[in-house]
Amino acid sequence: MSAPPTPVDNGGIPTIPQPRLRKVAMASSIGTTIEFYDFFIYGTAAALVFPTIFFSGMSSSIATLASFATFAVAFFARPVGAILFGHFGDLIGRKRTLVWTLLIMGIATVAIGLLPGSNSGVFGLFPNGIGTTAPVLLVLLRFLQGFAVGGEWAGAVLLTAEYAPKNKRGLYAMFPQLGPAFAFFLSSGTFLVFTIAAGTDNNADSAFMTIGWRIPFLMSALLVAVGLWIRLSVEETPVFKEVQRRDAVTDGRSRLPFLDAIRFQWREILIAGGALASLFSLFYMGTAFLTSYATKNLGFSRITVLTMGMIAAVIFGLTIALSAAWSDRIGRRKVIMFSCSLAVVWSLVMFPLLDTQNIVLYGVSLIGTLVIFGIAYGPAGAALPEMFHERYRYTGAGLGYTLAGVLGGAIPPLLASVFVANGDVMYVGIMLAGLSLLSVLCTYLMVETKGRRIVQGSPTEDLADRRDGATSDRVNL
């Protein structure tokens, strides 16, 4: 007879068997991988395909700017998703809400793969395209993608952080953080395969530009089905169950988590958004903008750029794992501060390296950008849930994360496209350095959260302890 599974000490929360923890880790990681795969194939297509397919009547630089404008729409949709899904995630549970975010993202992504272009149809339908309706529908579907991602990230990190054993919260909250690395590898890989199969011709009538680019979007349906199967098999987090049990007795449930998060912890939302803004700017510049810049401005082939992306994704994932584990030893704040400080310097040297038009230095620039992001992204999976009270944790963590997305993920690629079009490439580095300085300041204002209780008392009683930074003497429940 085999031995029973070894329970894990979760600091007061009922012990969790190792097999159940592994299933939770897998569910959170696969879910974010699928969500970000859908998100990133859009970014890759925005760089390589959409200017030709949906903005064919414009000049090359204006079409690229318009394409990245649709990319930015998702970041402005994220706060809406964070508020709505955060509301339900804090009231009805993390698991049920995460099922809906995955479904919405999958439906929107498959629909993009079926969308006719401005001047060309798809699969024999609308042979002359659908004109200006095409970019309008593209914007709407992109909004739905951002809406879903706005509710996905907070729920995924809560799923692991609220299950995690004490003193290993950074390590376990790392699993959903690996999703972007897996997704960047998959999105680059699928586009690479279909580029090779369909050819590298950028003509609007080429096999890749008519059909090949659509296949990664359509494949999302299979990934979503797998993700739903795994997610539905996971139980609700023990922390949320404890909150439900306690609030049933005291009637302490938050009816409007969004208002409570703003009322009690507006400062933490702003600090979280500012602290992660630099990291978002580096990440989306590295995964979307540099793909466009390398092919259109540096003259590298699409195959070369996508291959570099896959290599960078592997190193990026390793960095996330190491930094998350590191944060369990020295604290979240120190690791994030180290990353933001590196980003200030790196932002100023990145584009001079790129403009050498040397393929090796391009690889160094891409990998360096993602490594610096990964150093901070690893511990962020534990840091943001630890910053907020459990009654509105889904909402608060989601708002902080999506604020960072607007500041660092939506605005910089748009401004960078304008700067590059005007020949002012150095201004891109200066802009990124400025955002990094803002993140250094906000990280300085953060309170260390390592060792903080995952279940609190009332929001007002707990707030003073949070801002005094009293973590080492707290009971890690």
Image (cartoon, rainbow, N blue to C red):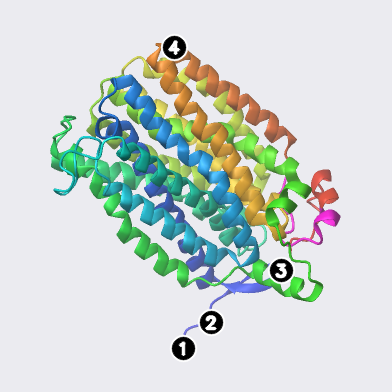
Question: Is label 2 in a helix, a strand or a loop?
Answer: loop
164 vs 455, left or right, is left
Circle 1/circle 3 CB separation < 8 Å: no
Residue annotated with mark 2: 4
Q: Which residues are magenta?
A: 448-462
Whole-angstrom CA distance, mark 4 to mark 3, is: 53 Å
Circle 2/circle 3 CB separation < 8 Å: no
Q: Earlier in the sequence, mark 4 or mark 3?
A: 3
Whole-angstrom CA distance, mark 1 to mark 3, is: 37 Å
Residue drawn at point x = 63 percent, y = 31 percent: 439
- Label 3 Cα crowd, 10 Å radius (few <14 / some 14-19 / many 20+): some
- Label 4 Cα crowd, 10 Å radius (few <14 / some 14-19 / many 20+): few
Question: Is label 1 in a helix, a strand or a loop?
Answer: loop
In percent of width and height, residue 370 lies at 46, 35
Question: Is label 4 in a helix, a strand or a loop?
Answer: loop
Mark 1 is on which residue type?
A: Met
Question: Which label number is shown at residue 243?
Answer: 3
Residue annotated with mark 4: 424
323 vs 110, left or right, is right
Is 227 magenta? The answer is no
Residue annotated with mark 1: 1
Residue drawn at point x = 59 percent, y = 44 percent: 401
Mark 3 is on which residue type?
A: Val
Mark 4 is on which residue type?
A: Asp
